[in-house]
Amino acid sequence: MADHQGMAIGVGFFPAGGDGDSAPEDCYAALVRGPASLYPRGYPWLVPVWLAALIVLLAWGWSAAVVAPAWWYYPLGLGGLAIAAITLVAVLKTVRHLAFRADGNGVRLGIRSRRKRPRQRQVHLWWADVQQIGILPRHYGALLEITLGPSARIVRRRGLPRQALLMTGMLVLPLGLGRGAPRLTEPRGRGPQYRVPLYEVTPEEVGMALAALALPEVEITVMSHRHHPLLARRPSPVRQPAA
């Protein structure tokens, strides 16, 4: 775990007052792996559709302007399409951005933006609303699962009709609608739960850092590769006053 003098590569503690906060406080930041911190749900899977449309347009234009392609052109085109789609999806799956920050107030998910509506790119989870945090090991680092309590203000998950409309819009206007609310800021299930893939960290490191920042009522569990708890911090039971 990095010290208070600066931020390590991908993860560490640093003074939060350096970006204009009134009072400095410890803040834990980490890199988030994948396109979830940039693009909405389903955006990466539109890449093969765009490539296929490009191949069809090129083949149609070539046939109309010159002559119909030979039969062996189509297998080569499909092979090139498959290689390009796999490459682009693999690149999107491995990109990393500083999109996770935790301090004494709560957890902030999303990339800092200077857009007119930066709240659409971030979500702030207050510790009072967080019920449980589970940390699972992954080959790239750790997967953080944040579950909110029943009294938390819930941001509803996008339903199937709205998701279908969004996918259609992103297919036509990828640079417009594709810059909407990122997948990272959208809850999963009815819990609701947020899943954050953290890069180049260990589950034990993340668990110790969040245990020092979260409220005592937040349950924190670090799981092993065999799904056995390594470290666990249970909330203290509330003692009733003596009669």
Image (tube, rainbow, N blue to C red):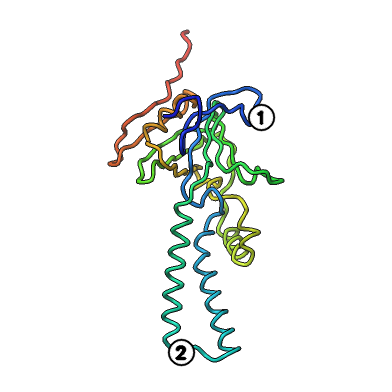
In this rendering, would 94 be left or right of 112?
left
Tell me what residue is drawn at x 57 percent, y 58 percent: 163
Q: Which residue is drawn at the image coordinates 65% and 27% (left, top)?
A: 21
Q: Rounded to the nearest whole Å, what is the CA distance between mark 2 and mark 1?
A: 63 Å
Q: Residues within 10 Å of mark 2 (few under 14, many from 20)?
A: few
Question: How far across and how far down the image is residue 117, in percent?
Answer: 69, 45
Q: Position of residue 84 (x, y in %)?
A: 46, 67
- Residue at (50% x, 35% y) in the render: 29
Residue 70 lies, in percent from the top left, at 46, 89
Q: Furthest residue to the left?
A: 226
* Secondary element type, mark 1: loop
Residue that lies at the very extreme toward the top in this rendered image: 243
Residue for badge 2: 70
Q: Amino acid at mark 1?
A: Gly
Dot 1, crowdedness within 10 Å: few (<14), some or many (≥20)?
few
**Residue at horizontal 49%, vertical 62%?**
45
Picture disc at residue 181: none
Q: Please, is residue 33 above or below residue 177 in the view?
A: above
> Which amino acid lies under the numbered mark 2 shown in the image of this protein?
Ala
Q: Nearer the viewer, residue 60 or 234?
A: 60
The part of the image, by quadrant, that contains residue 220 is top left
